[in-house]
Image: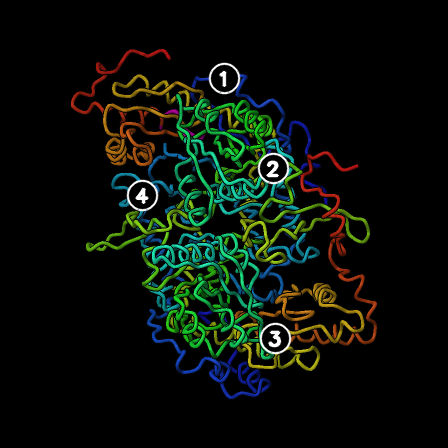
Amino acid sequence: MDLIFEKSVEGKRGFLNPKSDVDVRAEMPSSYKRQKECHLPEVSELDVVRHFTNLSKRNFSVDSNFYPLGSCTMKYNPKFTEDLARLCGFTHLHPLLPQLKQGEKLVQGALGVLYEMDRWLCEITGMDSFTMQPLAGAHGELTGVMMMAAYHKSKGNKKKYIVVPDSSHGTNPATAAIAGYEIVCVPSDKNGVMDLSRLQEKITDEMAGFMLTCPNTHGIFNSNIDKITEMVHAVDGIMYYDGANLNAIMGRFRPGDVGFDVMHVNLHKTFATPHGGGGPGAGPVGVKEKLIPYLPISRVVRKEDGTYSLNYDYPDSIGYIASFYGNFGVILRAYAYLLLLGKEGLKEASNHAVLNANYIKERLKKHFALPYDHICMHEVVLSAATQAKSGVHAIDIAKFLIDKGIHPPTVYFPLTVQEAIMIEPTETESKQTLDHFIQAMVEADELSVTEPSAFKDLPKTMPISRPDETKAARDIDTNYFAEKPC
Amino acid sequence: MASYIGNTQKDVQDMLKVIGVKSIDDLFQDIKPRHASQSFDLPAGKSEFEVVECFRRLASQNAAHLIPFIGGGYYDHYIPAAVDAIISRAEFYTAYTPYQPECSQGTLQALYEFQSSICTLTGMEVANASLYDGGTALYEAAMMALRLTNRKKVLLDGGVSPIYRKILKSYTGNLHYEFQETSVAHGQSHRQEMEELLDENTAAVILQNPNFFGAIDDHSDIIKKAHELGVLAIESVYPIALGLIKTPGEMGADIVTGEGQSLGLPLNFGGPYLGFMATRKEFIRKMPGRIVGQTVDQEGRRCFVNTLQAREQHIRREKATSNICTNMSLCALQAVIYMSLLGKEGFKELAQLNLDKAEFARRMMERIKGVEVIRSSQTFNEFTVRLSKDASGVVEAMIGKGFAAGFPLGRYYKGMDNYMIVAVTEKRTKEEILRYVESLDEVLNKSNHCSSNRKEHVAS
């Protein structure tokens, strides 16, 4: 499809600015003036609308396709939350208003939402206090690890490294490294959970903390979780809970009850806010009491008279981690979702998320290798290792599914499983949809036996076939206006 | 069903039978009783209607009606309706990161167009597909410069947003980097201090244009000096101003970041916003965040993919350039739609309109007793004024008159209690500006606020 720039016709306008109603025409001195033309397109409003509408048709999305992308919790995003987040009482609110004298009075509704979200998340996770500021899951991780560092610093602990399991999300080691720690990795055992004896070897006085996803990325809940927290706490290590998989355990298990000290929650996963093609998300971080002094500023507090205010006076705080109070528009949607579901709805969401994943596992384990044959939580990891022997790899299965109108599961992650296919159906999908998916997977398996070469040209129903990724990385073209490589 | 569950009771029974367990509870057997939730004391669910009512009440408790003359890096610009109409298409907003390019060309091409628009706007060669916000983007730029140069020191202009400066310092608190700050001279970057502090241990100098006081600067001389010492120049910009003012590319900047809120995103009480980053082509492999590249498919047709992923956390883990995963795709889409609608001429006009309205407001304000408009440097749509009274008190009084009158500088700058910055965008009408000036006059000169108290027109 043509680029919007290629549709440009000199003289076309997509939007008219208001005519100036002041009789001043100021001149920007030439020394400060831009000399080179800015090549934004010249197109009509209809050109723009049609261009992007046609682009939108080139996407799979939750509203149009089953989207069992493991680790991403692509559940249905309710429509009413979109309306609520667009109320002008929220959208028109300037973020600096509460920083004016008496300015908190101007934003009581907004501060109330932040405060109430904190309370809800504490009760769901067993933590003592949340900051709503982190703007994504990975940003939450960084905030959490920074608090970990501040805690050790204040206690005079000499800590050097953070331990992560080999099945962890890539963000965990990346975050720990960026926060200034070395990384030590613990392998999984044959059951797909972390090897406790190997963990014990890694625990020394220099261990700052441990980052764990539970259930882990194999979809398995670690029954030794309380032992692990004891081992880590014995050296004054901090237990970090990666909340990416919170959708599995609501109402059943709270990280705060078994010794986790800090965690993040991905509102865009568990609490149904739209993923937006890759953001905006939101990654609030919760802590137990011992880390409260280090929470970022500002913090929302409720005063005795029931009004809310922002407090900046926390001398041990790690400081500012974002410009303001979090991705407020995302928080609003998540809050509306929480109010709607309530206690029973949240528990039911986890129940069906786990039921759906186990159903897929049972139906597909005859067709695909199952590295860990164990009751799974909200997601299941299969392997295309058998199919790979005839040359059909996980990526080929993925492309086959695209032609069936299904967004592929996560492939090649976790790294611990060869030819991994990581499936997370979520609770909002029905048995009928799962059956359709299972049928497609079975067909893929059958085709891998009868005609393995058929996969190489898939998908065939999309506007494009498989892209040349090597060329993309070699002849780098990321800007239409750049001089093209010769 | 309230939790948007897809299965019926019969489905549940059929599925349990396939799995070979009696109840859903059996699926949670790995969660031992000693791990079980100690509490889950939450309210019961509500109907959609009840939640809507609750939100209407909450929204009404916010003073969104105030006419904003407040900016500070976040501005009240008009957003054409087509922006929201397009981003409301579920094909965009309910998709995720384009891991599978064949069924994500919509998002990928839009991001490529976003990157290209940011490049032409900033005068740079390459841009990424977005970062969280302007403040965290600047932090990522500083980290990128530290990686590129292998040096430990960063020089920070005092005109950079105080919020951004606080963010930079929080993130590097546990790392062994040194931040040196320079002061501001006549509103602009302090050349002499910069020159004294720039040395061969400096990784980067961080500048902002226009700066927090609203002053426009040409940083070419500082950047030239920096380059002589192998120092990288990072420039944080306000994108709307770039319709008119010298681009960071023209000044020779190495890394450009900015807050993209003004490009079609509502103020939204601080987010979601949009961080953007652009740089030189030679640095692309050290740039954080997702990058979309153009390539061809098996038939040689143009298509787009996430490229240079070897920089990223899901491949490189602890060796990644950043821990960033989710970015701000939908906000980047908002921005590229906005920029496309405004277009080449509209964007220039918009910048000129902002400049004109602000200049009109300045001239009107200069007529009031007790207001000194600081004219020591060129400005765009935001400017500094010194009041005869404490600015925070004046702004508080102006709220009573229906205005968010500006941002008092005393909050972040010592000794500037009587100063505030005032922003005037294209949305402020002549009538609003005149009413604002009149109200300010009343607040400042309350005891005797008839016209005789007005100064004669002060020529600048």
Residue B386 falls in image quadrant: top left
The residue carrying mark 2 is B279
Dots 2 and 1 on the same chain: no
Question: Of circles 2 and 1, which is in front?
Answer: 2
Closer-to-camera residue (B66/A175): A175
Q: Chain of mark 4?
A: A
- Image: magenta residue range: B424-432
The residue carrying mark 3 is A432
Distance CA(mark 4)–CA(mark 3): 49 Å
Amino acid on which disc 2 is placed: Thr
> Label 2 crowding class (10 Å Cα cut-off): few <14, some 14-19, many 20+?
many
Distance CA(mark 3)–CA(mark 1): 66 Å
Q: Which secondary structure class fits the magenta region best?
A: loop
Q: Position of residue A377 (x, y in %)?
A: 53, 75
Looking at the rendered structure, which numbered label has been put on residue A98? 4
Q: Are marks 4 and 3 in contact (CB under 8 Å)?
A: no
Question: Of circles 3 and 2, which is in front?
Answer: 2
Q: Position of residue A371 (x, y in %)?
A: 64, 77
**Which residue is most to the left?**
B447
Label 1 secondary element: loop
Q: Is residue A47 visible?
A: no
